[in-house]
Image (spheres, rainbow, N blue to C red):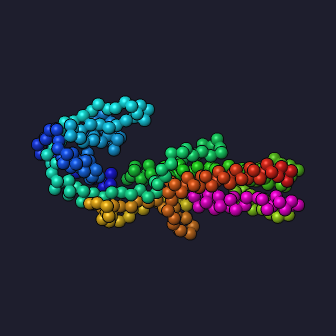
């Protein structure tokens, strides 16, 4: 829904029965496309399915086009052979189109269906606390963004553990377990600084030269941005559409640094790239460790 209210069906007008003309079908399709109009929907699927439950108009009447992902060949048989006369009024439809605001969800721009995973068996627990007046749509959007943000942070945590192992490998302490316990209190940035200081005085210049520091520092910086930033929803002003009647409204999510208050756009596609970058840095570090087993 683009607006927080919907105009009901024109039940005060008589019913017009199929077959519909091509022009009437075009009007009904325009009616179904307006965000502010109550749509003709299949009662078997209901509001919970939203657009999936919208009936599709044709010359012979309305039909339900819903398909379940589990049984894509199993079609719903629900049909309706009438429409209210008010839905076939060009002026009514035009007014609805002019009233409509079409929302562009800027932050949800990831069209890839490739599943995202991290090199970890950790579970990430996310919880939210809101005031009494809950906007469930906003909470759902934030939950999706936070889930993907959590994938980046989780992968960085696994990378942090591997850096701790690299510190032990380079230091060769007399009591590895005691040293590991001490490193457990170090954040990823401090561990990376320690590795760099050890490599700076290391006898093997090749080990120092081939160390993937740039990749690792990029992940550290991004991890800190995501972990220490608040995400907030920004709704832009409505403006006339360039491609048709009505208005359009841009909705985006911003990541705001709690210390500097610097704001940047956060998107699903961008977070996907962050996950890939963290995975690549992890892989590069593993390759470096394998190539320098005695260092």
Which segment is the magenta one? 202-227
Residue 89, position as x, y percentages in the image: 15, 51
Q: Is residue 261 left or right of residue 98?
A: right
Any part of residue 104 in sight: yes
Residue 128 in view, yes or no: no
**214 within the magenta span:** yes
Q: Residue furthest front?
A: 22
Q: Nearer the viewer, residue 53 or 134?
A: 53
| Residue lying at 46% horizontally and 57% vertically, measured from the top left | 107
Identify the residue shown where x is 60% and y is 45%.
117
Residue that extends furthest to the left in the rendered view of this protein: 14
- Which residue is depicted at the point 73% across and 58% down? 212
Q: Residue at x 27, y 41 (%)?
A: 56
Give coordinates of residue 30: x percent, y percent: 25, 51
Decide if residue 109 is on the left or right side of residue 29.
right
Find residue 57 and report its image quarter. Answer: top left
Taking 281 as reference, is 83 left or right?
A: left
Q: Position of residue 17 (x, y in %)?
A: 14, 38
> Taking 114 as reference, is 226 above or below it?
below
Report whether 127 appears left or right of 66. right
- Majority secondary structure of magenta residues: helix
Classify 265 as above or below 165: below
Which of the two residues, 164 or 217, is positioned nearer the viewer here?
217
- Residue 23 or 165: which is nearer the viewer? 23
**Viewer-side residue, 173 vs 131:** 173
- Residue 2: quarter of image: bottom left
Q: How many marks?
A: 0
Q: Position of residue 273 (x, y in %)?
A: 57, 55
* Magenta-colored stretch includes residue 99: no
Q: Height in image: 224 above or below 154?
A: below
């Amino acid at each position: 829904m683009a607006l927080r209210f919907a105009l009901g069906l024109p039940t005060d007008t008589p019913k017009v029965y199929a077959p519909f003309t091509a022009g009437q079908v075009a009007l009904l399709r325009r009616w179904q496309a307006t965000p502010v109009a109550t749509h003709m929907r299949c009662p078997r699927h209901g509001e919970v399915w939203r657009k999936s439950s919208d009936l599709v108009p044709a010359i012979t009447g309305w039909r339900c086009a819903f398909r379940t992902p589990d049984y894509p060949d199993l079609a719903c048989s629900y049909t309706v052979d009438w429409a209210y006369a008010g839905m076939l009024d060009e002026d009514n439809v035009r007014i609805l189109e002019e009233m409509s605001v079409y929302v562009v969800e800027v932050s949800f721009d990831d069209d890839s269906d490739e599943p995202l995973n991290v090199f970890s068996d950790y579970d990430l627990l996310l919880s939210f606390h809101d005031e009494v007046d809950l906007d469930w749509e906003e909470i759902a959007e934030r939950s999706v963004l936070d889930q993907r943000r959590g994938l980046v942070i989780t992968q960085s945590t696994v990378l942090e553990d591997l850096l701790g192992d690299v510190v032990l490998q380079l230091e060769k302490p007399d009591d590895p377990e005691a040293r590991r316990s001490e490193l457990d209190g170090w954040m990823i940035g401090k561990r990376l600084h320690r590795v760099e200081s050890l490599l700076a005085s290391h006898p093997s210049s090749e080990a120092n030269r081939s160390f993937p520091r740039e990749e690792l520092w990029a992940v550290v910086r991004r991890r800190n941005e995501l972990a220490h930033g608040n995400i907030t929803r920004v709704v832009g002003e409505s403006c006339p559409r360039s491609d048709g009647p009505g208005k359009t409204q841009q909705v985006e999510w911003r990541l705001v640094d709690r210390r500097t208050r610097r704001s940047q756009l956060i998107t699903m596609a961008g977070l996907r790239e962050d996950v890939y970058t963290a995975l690549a840095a992890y892989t590069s570090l593993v390759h470096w460790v394998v190539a320098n087993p005695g260092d």
